[in-house]
Amino acid sequence: SSFCRFVVGTFGLRALFEERKRKKMPLFTLSANFDVEEAKLVGLLKEIVQSLAALMKKNPEYYMPIWSKQTMVLGLTTDPALFITLQSIGQINAELNAQYSALICSFFEEKLGVAKERIFINFVDLKGANTGNDGITLAMFD
């Protein structure tokens, strides 16, 4: 019957929507003024992504961490420092950002010895219409 097709179609669309919702790719960009051996770095990035994904309630498969070494002077010194940008469609707000900041700063202080006061984080709430993935924009999340 048409009602059955409607119910099946609706639930199929709901499943597709929920899958797309989980795919809202957080971009995690880290700039550092020091080197980290690549194998160690890959392990650290995977570990922080798992922690962020749990806190952000997003699938860790869709995170894209990017690390780069930059010339960076903070407070007139070149002591180890990090500048981090966390971009996401949704899950960016004052309350959550405080939690992310605590997690990220503690993680890199413990794992790499970067003092928390030398870690700066920029949080960016992306609009889906301005974000593309898999040949489409993610406007459905706006």
Image (cartoon, rainbow, N blue to C red):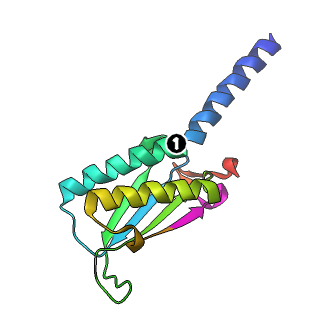
Residue 14 picture location, percent across and down: 67, 29
Q: Magenta residues, as a range? A: 122-131
Residue 122 picture location, percent across and down: 52, 68
Find disc 1 in the rendering and name its residue: 58
Q: Answer yes or no: is residue 82 visible.
A: yes
Q: Answer yes or no: is residue 93 visible.
A: no
Residue 69 picture location, percent across and down: 29, 73
Near-viewer residue (127 or 105) = 105
Residue at 34% of width from left, 69% of height from top?
Answer: 115
Judged left or right of residue 141, residue 106 is: left
Residue at 38% of width from left, 86% of height from top?
Answer: 75
Asked if the magenta segment contains residue 33, the reply would be no
Q: For residue 132, what is the image quadrant?
A: bottom right
Label 1, secondary structure: give it: loop
Near-viewer residue (7 or 67) = 67
Q: Amino acid at mark 1?
A: Lys
Asked if the magenta segment contains residue 124, the reply would be yes
Near-viewer residue (69 or 79) = 79
